[in-house]
Amino acid sequence: AQSVAQPEDQVNVAEGNPLTVKCTYSVSGNPYLFWYVQYPNRGLQFLLKYITGDNLVKGSYGFEAEFNKSQTSFHLKKPSALVSDSALYFCAVRADLLMFSGGYNKLIFGAGTRLAVHP
Amino acid sequence: ETGVTQTPRHLVMGMTNKKSLKCEQHLGHNAMYWYKQSAKKPLELMFVYNFKEQTENNSVPSRFSPECPNSSHLFLHLHTLQPEDSALYLCASSQALRGSYEQYFGPGTRLTVT
């Protein structure tokens, strides 16, 4: 089955400390992976993606994510957290085209992880 | 910001009202999506239109009626809603199968059903 798991409902980090938001996935074939951020009363905002190539992907606002095929993980990281990073973060994977042939890029989202960065 | 706009941003409606949500994308995409986001629940994909054709309807009640007149516009017509339909309704768009793969979201419409 295709799925995305975000094992932590909430992550608390002190400002200036490194942060990690975890994501694991299950999909047949090569995974196409995404991270989104949602600020209060806003839509989801695309942060970064992994399609192929380097396992470390850099995105917006200083975020990066590390693709680990053997652990089927795609954790979001930032070396130094800001209070303004506090938001809801979603991991997503593109539905396996072998199992889904709708002709568009269907994404399967995780349940989201709330990141709280404390001053 | 992202090239996807939604109106209205906030909507309060009674259970007997009829209203419509509008989404417009300026990104040249061919696929458009409606999602429902309720508190403490995963994001729910409601409908998908690909090249103006509805390709997915995830068992959404008939009181929600989508319309896609062209690849840039998407509507969600609402009638006789229930209080549990109160949620943030998000529109998104993406290129067709090949392309940049990610979906771009609008700011959402916060719907309250009284």
Image (cartoon, rainbow, N blue to C red):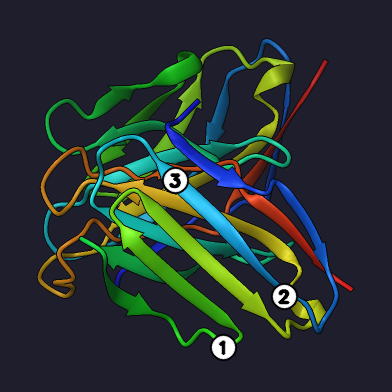
Vertically, is B78 above or below B70?
below
Residue toward you, A99 or B32: B32
Say which element carries label 2.
helix
Residue underneath mark 3: B24
Question: Is residue B64 left or right of B4 when viewed as pictured?
Answer: right
Task: Identify the residue at image location x=18%, y=73%.
Answer: A100
Residue that mark 2 sits on: B85
Distance CA(mark 1)–CA(mark 3): 23 Å
Q: Is residue A37 above or below residue A93?
A: above
Labels 1, 3: front one: 3
Split into 4 quadrants, where in the image is the C terminus of chain B? bottom right
Instruction: Tell me what residue is drawn at x 67 percent, y 10 percent.
Output: A16
Where's residue B113, x and y in %? 82, 72
Q: Three-letter amino acid code at disc 2?
A: Asp
In this picture, is B85 found above or below B30?
below
Above or below: residue A45 compared with residue B6: above
Q: Residues within 10 Å of mark 2 (few under 14, many from 20)?
A: some
> Mark 1 falls on what kind of element?
loop
Q: Is residue A105 left or right of residue B93?
A: left
Q: Is residue B43 visible?
A: no
Which tag, 3 or 2, sits closer to the chain's start? 3
Residue under label 1, please give it.
Answer: B61
If you read the primary sequence from the N terminus, does the residue marked by circle 1 or circle 3 appear first?
Answer: 3
Q: Which amino acid, mark 1?
A: Pro
Q: Amino acid at mark 3?
A: Glu
Circle 3 packing at 10 Å, graded few (<14), some (14-19), many (20+), is many
Residue found at the very far right of the displayed protein: B114
* Mark toward the start of the polypeptide (2 vs 1): 1
